[in-house]
Image (spheres, grey):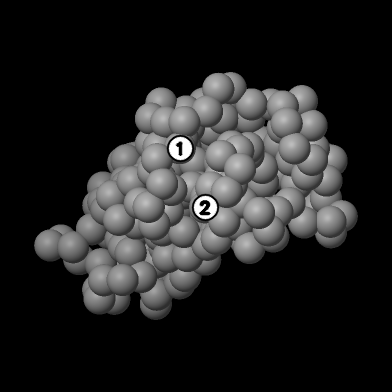
């Protein structure tokens, strides 16, 4: 059970099974894709939908974050999650409440020349909504200069990485070293965060996306 996106209706439903690869039809074990456009490798948002005139509840998927292509009679809806189709299949994940974890983490950045100026990096998290990305950050360092890396939300100010502003710090000795850190950063609706480095030589830098936290409109 849940409230719709406007908190006007309280929706209750038994379990429903819907098929992403088939155009929407009413009922369980039926098509679930709202739009008649061909199936794509992209993000699809999952919705529970409600027809208040006939008191009908159903579900489906849309590339629109507002379920713009849902059947006309279902005037109320609630987004309950998002799924990612890539390489012709849905990327596997587990869900625990608002926490979505990829079965196989994704390397979203791997570079030996990280930028010294701000870069907007697109992560493997839903587009169209703001989520909290869960990332592992790592570096391998072969130099003696201390290196600072900073990940920030694009909603915050661009800041120069330093000893007082960093997500990950490494280097500073005469031997090769490896370090890592965990970061949770809010994205924008384009699935982006900001990153920058203080040094971009004698270093390998990686950002891995493990999953994301999506409150799915519960807190709005």
Tell me where residue 168 appears, x and y as whole percent. Answer: 28, 50
| Rendered-image quadrant of the C terminus | bottom left
Of the pair 104 and 30, the residue shown nearer to us: 30
User: Looking at the rendering, which quadrant does residue 55 occupy?
Assistant: top right
Question: Can residue 113 be seen in the rendering of this structure?
Answer: no
Of the pair 36 and 110, the residue shown nearer to us: 36
Is 11 left or right of 24, judged from the image as shown?
left
Tell me where residue 145 appears, x and y as whole percent. Answer: 28, 60
| Rendered-image quadrant of the N terminus | top left
Is 220 left or right of 23, judged from the image as shown?
left
Q: Residue at x 33, y 46 (%)?
A: 218
Badge count: 2
Tell me where residue 28 appears, x and y as whole percent. Answer: 72, 27
User: Which circle's residue, 1 or 2, is located before the other in the chain?
Assistant: 1
Q: Residue at x 25, y 67 (%)?
A: 161
CB under 8 Å between callouts 1 and 2? yes
Residue carrying label 1: 11
Q: Residues within 10 Å of mark 1 (few under 14, many from 20)?
A: many
Q: Which mark is residue 76?
A: 2
């Amino acid at each position: 059970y849940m409230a719709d996106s406007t908190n006007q209706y309280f929706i209750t439903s038994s379990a429903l099974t819907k098929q992403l690869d088939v155009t929407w039809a009413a009922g369980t074990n039926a098509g679930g894709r709202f739009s008649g456009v061909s199936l794509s490798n992209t993000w699809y948002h999952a919705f529970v939908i409600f027809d208040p005139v006939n008191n009908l509840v159903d579900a489906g998927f849309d590339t629109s974050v507002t379920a713009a292509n849902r059947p006309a009679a279902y005037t109320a809806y609630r987004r309950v999650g998002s799924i990612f189709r890539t390489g012709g299949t849905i990327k596997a994940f587990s869900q625990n409440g608002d926490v979505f974890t990829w079965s196989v983490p994704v390397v979203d950045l791997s570079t030996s020349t990280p930028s010294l100026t701000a870069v907007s990096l697109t992560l493997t998290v839903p587009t169209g909504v703001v989520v909290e990305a869960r990332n592992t950050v790592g570096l391998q360092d072969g130099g003696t200069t201390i290196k600072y890396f900073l990940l920030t939300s694009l909603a915050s100010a661009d800041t120069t990485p330093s000893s007082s502003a960093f997500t990950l710090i490494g280097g500073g000795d005469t031997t090769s070293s490896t370090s890592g850190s965990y970061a949770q950063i809010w994205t924008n609706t384009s699935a982006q965060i900001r990153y920058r480095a203080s040094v971009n030589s004698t270093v390998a830098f990686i950002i891995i996306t493990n999953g994301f936290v999506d409150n799915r409109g519960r807190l709005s």
